Image (cartoon, helix red, strand yellow):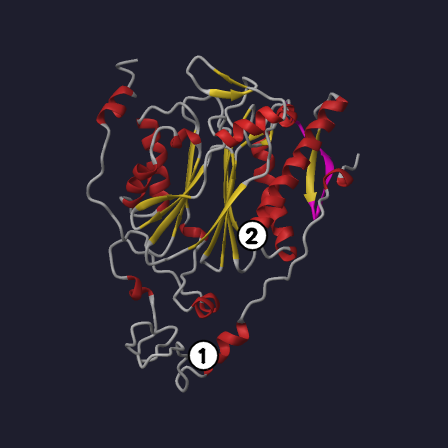
Amino acid sequence: MSTAALITLVRSGGNQLRRRVLLSSRLLQDDRQVTPTCNSSTSEPRCSRFDPDGSGRPATWDSFGIWDNRIDEPILLPPSIKYGKPIPKISLENVGCASQIGKRKENEDRFDFAQLTDEVLYFAVYDGHGGPAAADFCHTHMETCITDLLPKEKNLETVLTLAFLEIDKAFSSHARLSADDGSGDQMLKYTTGSFSALPCVAATLLTSGTTATVALLRDGIELVVASVGDSRAILCRKGKPMKLTIDHTPERKDEKERIKKCGGFVAWNSLGQPHVNGRLAMTRSIGDLDLKTSGVIAEPETKRIKLHHADDSFLVLTTDGINFMVNSQEICDFVNQCHDPNEAAHAVTEQAIQYGTEDNSTAVVVPFGAWGKYKNSEINFSFSRSFASSGRWA
C-alpha cells in the first residue's frame, strides 16, 4: 500500500547553494599584485581580509594560537574568502562518538553523522523510548530527508523544521499501517520526497517515540541546531558551555500550557517528576502517536550561531543518561582534558556511569578550531557522587 500521498509536504522554494570557485581562483591569481582592503573613512592603514594584523603574512592555523593537542585541518578557501577569516575543514574522521547501555536491558539511543553536500555536515543523536523503533526510523531516514530538502531551501532552520515534521508524519503513517493490518510487518522507505511501504519485522509502534537533536554545519562556520525532547547540544566557547537547546518538559510553562490547551494533562510520579498524561516525561518528540492529540508535537526549536574557531573548542550532543548526571560545565571540563574527540566521547559516557546513571548514555563530540586550547588542569570531581554510585550506600 502506497503512503506517499499521506506524507509529502509542500516545501518552500529556495536557490541552490552556489560555490564561489571563480572568486577564489581570481583571488589566488591576483594575490601577489592586488591586496583586498577594508574600506575605512579614517587615515588608518588598510588591511587585507586575510591579513587582519597588517603583517603582510596570510592567515593560517597559527593565527588561532599554538597549543598542545591542536588538530591542524586544511583551511576551507571559499568560506574563508567569504567571511574574511580562516575557517578550518571539519573532518568526519575526527568526530568522536560513544554509547553505553547503562543498566537498561536494551540501548535505545542512536547517533549519526555524515557529509550531506560539499558545504553541509550533519550530526545527530536520538534517544528512543517505548522501544527503539522511532529512534531507528530517524537514524535510517533523517539524513536522506534533509539531503533532499537542502537544494530546495536555503534556510537551514527551515530545512530542519520541515525534516522533523516530515519524518514524524512518515513514522505515524508507518505505525498506523502496522496497527491497521495487525501484523506489524510493514515499514516505510524514504525515496526522493516520499515514502513507500516495505516489509519488515516491527514491534508495537503506537507508543514508541524518540528525542531528536540534530546539528547542521555549513561552510565550517554556520551552525544550526534543531531539537525535540531532552537530548542536548552544547558549544564549548572559551572553555565555558553555551547551551544550544532547551529541554522540552512539562515543567516549562509554555509547554505545559500547550498540553492543557490540547486536552492533555500533567501528572507527577512518586519521584515528583511531571509526565504528559502520566506517561511521557517530554512535551515534544518524534513518534508517541497516542499523545499527538494531547499536545505532544514534533516541531523543533531551532538555534543558529556563527562559530568563532579561535574560541570554539567543540560541539557535543548528549542524551539524558548524561545530562541528568553530569552538568554542562563538567562535560566541557572532561572533554577538554582529553587528547582526541573519540577519547572525549568515551570519557563523558563513562563519567555518567561513574556518577550512577542507569539510562543509556550517548555522546557525539565535534572538534572545532580551538580544540585543546582551553585545557583545564583542575576538574571539580565529585567523590560523593562517584562513591554513592558504587552501590555501597544503595
- What is the count of numbered marks? 2
Q: Quadrant of the C terminus?
A: top left
**Amino acid residing under circle 2:** Leu
Query: Please, what secondary structure does the residue beneath circle 1 have?
Result: helix
Dividing the picture into quadrants, the one containing residue 177 is top right
Q: Position of residue 288 (x, y in %)?
A: 61, 27
Q: Is residue 233 above or below residue 390?
A: below
Q: Residues within 10 Å of mark 1 (few under 14, many from 20)?
A: few
Foreground of the two, 56 or 260: 260
Question: Does residue 132 show up?
Answer: no
Q: Position of residue 276 (x, y in %)?
A: 55, 22
Dividing the picture into quadrants, the one containing residue 246 is top left
Residue 120, numbered label: none
Q: Is residue 200 magenta?
A: yes
Q: Quadrant of the N terminus?
A: top right
Magenta residues, start to end: 191-203
Q: Position of residue 222 (x, y in %)?
A: 47, 56
Q: Which residue is mark 1?
A: 28
Foreground: disc 2 or disc 1: 2
**Amino acid residing under circle 1:** Leu
**N-term mark: 2 or 1:** 1
Q: Is residue 151 above or below residue 244?
A: below
Q: Is residue 101 above or below residue 244?
A: above
Foreground of the two, 328 or 370: 328
Q: Residues within 10 Å of mark 2 (few under 14, many from 20)?
A: many
Residue 156, numbered label: 2
Seen as rendered, the residue at the extreme front is 41
Query: Please, what secondary structure does the residue beneath circle 2 have?
Result: helix
Foreground of the two, 363 or 271: 271
Residue drawn at x 33%, y 23% is 356
Q: Position of residue 261 (x, y in %)?
A: 61, 26
Dividing the picture into quadrants, the one containing residue 61 is bottom left
